[in-house]
Amino acid sequence: MKLLKIVLAVSLFCSAGISQAEVRALDSVAIIVNDGVILKSEINELINVVKSNAKNGTSALPSDRVLTTQVSERLITNLLKKQMAERISMRIGDPQLDDTINNIAKEQNFTLSQLKTQLENEGLSYSNYRESIRDDILLGQVERISVRRRVNITEQEINNLVTILNEHGENNTEFQLGHILISHNGDESAEGLASARIRADKVIGLLNKGDDFKNIAITSSSGPKALEGGDWGFMNINEMPTLFTDAVKGKNTGDIIGPFKSGNGYHIIKILDMKGQQKVDVDEVNAKHILIKPSIILSDTRVKEMLEGFIEDIKSGKSTIEELAKAHSADPGSAIKGGELGWNDPSIYVPAFINALDNLEIDEISPPFQSSHGWHIVKLIGKRKTDATDKFIKNRAYQMLFSRKFAEESDAWTKELRNTAYIEILD
């Protein structure tokens, strides 16, 4: 898998033979967004990435004019999210960034050194790659924080969905959905709605003739996944937006559904694929840990030395991890329990903590390691496999409801950001 599939802000100034006049022309302001700007070079960079990603696919890309429109929309939305992050003083520190990059390398079966080599082979600089990942994390985090507080899930909703899952768990199908939104662009007059419907009907006509769905989505959609060809990935019927739920019931792979109307315009869905959800065992771990956070008077080096001293005390029998956690750990929830975290799916932890647990045997203590929370030592207490218990099903029900409501509220939040922003397209 080429790493270019991660959208990178690759500098074009490294290209040989570009004159100063061409650089100035390339870097002229294209769009003003509140007190920020989007440069022509940024638009061209993202267009080049989209084109590069499409080389290995079967879909033909639309014209540069259409790509410019779609890319501009994406960059405007991203800049608005960055401006929101600045207003709430949100930033992504190096430890969190390093954890994420190490995890990306692991998922690609690369060491960090191999990842850097792969980037070089693709003509990308590691420093630019790091900053693009930092931006990705920031955008996701500010959206989660802003949208999460708008999502309200009641206990009754969870219990109702648990009942449905228990009754129909054996036929818990997942749908890979393609989505196209034909927007009325804020014109909800009879004429505006009629114009949007005409455009939606034309899209349906092209799809029914066999035109490529992803190409049309990139060309025509105003939906959040337009640059991904409208692909929302696999979702259970209880995870997808309410608007889609009734539309996909009883449908099969390849079916095209719509257009149907919402407050944003007309929607068209294609079921790209379907699969039955299989029951799997849940791997859980129990661990005890001590967390120490660096401060102005406690450097990283000193923290690491403290934790190394704790390990020596535990191994010599001078003290126990429980006693040290109660006395020193900066994690109040586990410190009161002697550092014990309880049985959990390890995926709930940050990448550095997951990696540390992966390398431990039962009753073994890790060397000190750093995560986005601070410095840790962790002792693995036990591992087990469990079936999908009532607790797991309830958590699954909550996640399904949260995914559905988050997607709906995310669209509304993004629309509000756009509606309250000053946006001027200069070219």
Image: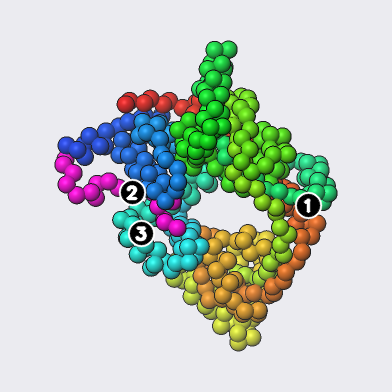
Q: Mark 3 to mark 2: distance in Å?
A: 11 Å
Does dot 2 land on a helix, a strand or a loop? Answer: loop
The structure's colour scheme is: rainbow
On whether residue 192 falls in the magenta region, the answer is: no
Disc nearer the start of the sequence (3/2):
2
Does dot 1 land on a helix, a strand or a loop? Answer: helix
Rendered view: 162 above or below 22 = below
Mark 2 is on which residue type? Val
The span picked out in magenta is 1-20
User: Which residue is drawn at the image coordinates 51% and 62% (left, top)?
Assistant: 107
The chief SS type of the magenta part is loop
Are the residues at dot 2 and dot 1 in contact (C-beta closer than 8 Å)?
Answer: no
Mark 3 is on which residue type? Leu
Which corner quadrant holds the C terminus?
A: top left
Disc nearer the start of the sequence (1/3):
3
Look at the image and tell me whether residue 77 can be seen.
Answer: no
Residue at numbered disc 1: 169
Query: Which one is closest to the eye, mark 1 or mark 3?
Result: 1
Between 303 and 416, the residue placed more toward the observer is 416
User: Which residue is drawn at the image coordinates 56% and 29% (left, top)?
Assistant: 204
Residue 322 appears at what percent x and percent y?
67, 74
Residue at numbered disc 3: 119
Between 365 and 222, the residue placed more toward the observer is 222
On whether residue 9 falls in the magenta region, the answer is: yes
Q: In the current view of this chain or complex, which residue is farthest to the bottom?
A: 316
**Quarter location, residue 26:** top left
**Quarter location, residue 269:** top right
Disc nearer the start of the sequence (2/1):
2
Residue at numbered disc 2: 10
